[in-house]
Image: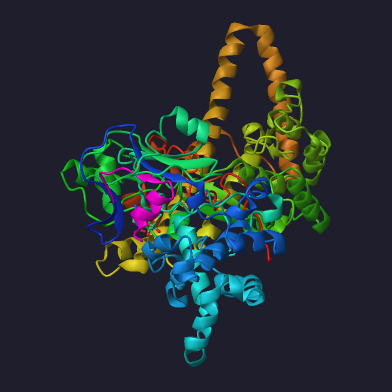
Amino acid sequence: MDFSTWLLNSGGRVHPELDLFYTLPSGDRGVVARSDISEGQLLLLLPINCAIYIPTEEEFKRHPDAFPDAVQYLREAHPGLSPFLATTLVLMSEMTRGSASTWASYVAILPPSCPDCLINWSDEEKQELAGTSLEQFGPDPASDVYRRHVAPILAARKDLWPGLAAAEAAEAADRGVDPGLTAFLRAAGLLQSRAFHLEAENWVSGAKEISRLEDGGTQVFLLPGIDMINHSHNPARRNAHLERLNLAQAATAKLLDGAASAEAPSLPAGVEAVFVMRADKPIKAGEEVLHTYGNLSDAQLLQTYGFLDSEDDLWSETAAAGVSSVLSPSAKKRTKAGGGGDSSGGYRNPYNAALVPWITVEEVCMGLLSSMNQAPSSSTRRAKQEFLATAGVLQAAAPESTQFVLLAQEPLPDEFMTAVQVLLMTADEFQELQREFGDPSKLPAGSKRVGRGPEAGGTSCEAAAAAAAVAATAAEGASTAKLSLGTALLEEDQDFAEMVCIASLQILAACMERYPTNVKDDVRLLRSPDCTGRQRLAVRVRLGEKDVIQLAKKAVVELMSSLRRGWAGEGSRDEEEKESDDEAAAAEEEREENVGRRRASKRQRRGLGAPPSEEPDREEDDENGSSADGSDLEGSSDSDDQAADELLMGSDDSDKVGYGAEEYDDGIGEVHDRGKPHEAPTDD
Ligand SMILES: C[S@@+](CC[C@H](N)C(=O)[O-])C[C@H]1O[C@@H](n2cnc3c(N)ncnc32)[C@H](O)[C@@H]1O
C-alpha cells in the first residue's frame, strides 16, 4: 500500500493540492503546493495512532492493546531507558518487521539515513569539529550506547526485532558488520532528524541524557507525513505550523468535517488526539511548505538534523526581508550593489552559542590572582566552587564540569560574569557575600532579594548584594534559585572592574585557542571553492562559535567603556551638585572620601598598591584601549578579529530575526540548555 493510501485508511488527511515527496533543486525532498492554498487550510492531519511514540503511563493503561509489543516490553522491562532510546528501539522494531509492520508504508518512504548527521561522519571528518561544542571525546558515543544499552535488549527479545536475526545470519559473519548496530545507527539518525518535541539527548555528542521513561519524561513523536516538511530559519518563508489537538478541539475547529466520507474514513476507535498542520498564510502554487525546527544554533542544527541554514538564503532572503544583522558590512555593501547570493559566508545565525568551561574560568582567574601575589588558599577555591554550585551558577551535580553558554544574543551571560567576580573577590569579600546570601538554594523560586545599597555606606560586597538578584531558573516552579551579581560591584570598584574585565578577556582568548584554526584560516577556507560538504559544515560551525566569542570580547570592552563613562559622569554630576547645594556638597565630599578610602583599602587588599593617577591615565587608557596594568581591554585588535569583523560582524539588530517557538515545533530543543550552565555528561 502506498503511503498516502495508508495515511487515509488510518484516518489521516492530506490536502489534495500537496505533493509530499517533491524533489527540490537541491536533490532533497520537500512538501510543495501544486496550486494555491489559502491561509488557515488544513495541510495534514495525523491521528495519534499513526505516530510512533512511547505513550505515557495513563495513555498506555487506557489502551494497552493499541501499541506495538515493543512498546509494552520496553515500558515494563526497561523503564530506565530514555524516551529517545526507547522510541529508537520501537522504530527499529517496525523497520525489522517488513510488511508485517503497521508502519510498513511509512518505513518505505524513509530515507536511507540522515546523510550528514554526525553519526555518519568519519573520525577524520570529525577532526574538523575539534574545539567546537560538537567535539567528541572517548569512544564513539553512538556505538558505545549501542554496545552498553541496545545490544543486550535486542539479544533478550529477538522476536521483537525479527529482521535482525535473519540479517545476522545472512551477512554479518563474513563482513564483520553487526546488523543490529547498522539498524540502530540508521534508526537513531532518522529519529533524531525527524522526531518532534525531542529535547536534548546528546548521547551523540556525549552530553546529558535528560529523562527516563519511568519519570514520564519528554515524549518523542515520529509523525509520518508531517515529518516531510523542511525547516526554514526565515520567518518570511515559513508558512505552516503544527498543533496537537484533542478530538473536541479538532471538531470545534471543524477539522474532522468529512472525516467519515468515503475518501477519508472515520478515525479508529480509541484515538484521542490528532496532530494538525495548517497553513499560516496563503501558499502559492509551486511554493514549498516550511516550518521551523526551533531556534537552533549551527551546532545544534548540524548535530540534530545534519544540515545548516542555506548560506544563499541568509544572504538574499534576509536582505529581502530587511534584516541586516546577519550580513557583514561587506556583505551589506555587496547586497546594496545587487551582489546577494555569493556563498562566501557573511552570515550570522542569531542562535549561535559558544561554551566556556568552568575549568578555564577558574584557571585564568587563579593565574591572574597569582600574578598579583593574591592566589587564594585551596580551601577558599573549594569554598567558592561550592558556593557557586549552591547558588545555581554552577551545576549542582558536577560543578567542575559546568560549561557557561555564551549566546550571540547574550554574549556575556550573568552566570559567567558572576562566577568571574566571585573568583576574583578577596577572601573577606567572599565571606561577606556568603553571609549576605546565606544559603541561596533555600530561597523561594522567583523571589528577588535586595540588600543594602551603596548609598547606605556599604562595602563593595554589600553593594553587590544590593544589586544581586536571585533569579528563578527558567522552569516555572523550579526550586533552585540563582545568584546574579550584575554590575553593581563593578560600578563601585574601578580596580575590581578592570580585573574582572581583564580576566574575562583572558578567558575568552583561552577559549579561542582551543580551536586548531584561527578565524582567518576559517574565513579563507569558506571563501575557497574547494571547501565543500562536511568540511564546509564544520568550518561554519566553528566560525559561528568564534563569532560568539568575538561578540563576548566586544561586550567586555563595551562594559568597561560604559563603566568608565559612569565613573567620569559621577565626577561631573558631583560638581553640579556642589555648586547648587552647599550642604549636599559637604555630604558628597564626605561620601567621596569614604569611597576613596574604601577604594584605597581595597586596592591594598587586592595588592594593587597606590591608585593610578586619575584622569590623564584613564584618558590614555581610553585612547589605546589598554587597562591600567597594560592589559588589552579592547580585546579585538588583532588581525583575526578584523577578518572576523569583515566577514561576520554586522550591527547587532539580531532580535529582528526571531524564530517564534511553537509547541511541538521545536525539534530537538535545547541541546545547549541555553541560558543555563551545561549539565555534565552522564554515563548510563
Ligand atoms: C524532518 S526531515 C524533512 C524531510 C526530508 N527532507 C526528507 O526528504 O525526508 C529533516 C531533514 O530534512 C533536511 N532538511 C530540512 N530542512 C532543511 C533545510 N532548510 N536545508 C537543508 N536540509 C533540510 C535535513 O536533511 C533534515 O535532516
Q: Quadrant of ligand 1?
A: bottom left
Residue 265 seen: yes
Quadrant containing the N terminus is: bottom left
Residue 372 seen: no
**Residue toward you, 393 or 489:** 393
User: Magenta span covers which residues?
Assistant: 1-19
Q: Position of residue 221 (x, y in %)?
A: 52, 52
Quadrant containing the C terminus is: bottom right
Q: Position of residue 360 (x, y in %)?
A: 62, 58
Q: Residue at x 78, y 38 (%)?
A: 440
Q: Is residue 7 covered in magenta?
A: yes
Asked where in the image residue 28 lies, by quadrant, the reply is bottom left
Q: Is residue 542 covered in magenta?
A: no
| 518 lies above or below 559 | below
Q: Position of residue 488 (x, y in %)?
A: 65, 32
Asked where in the image residue 612 lies, by quadrant, the reply is top right
Asked where in the image residue 79 lies, by quadrant, the reply is bottom right
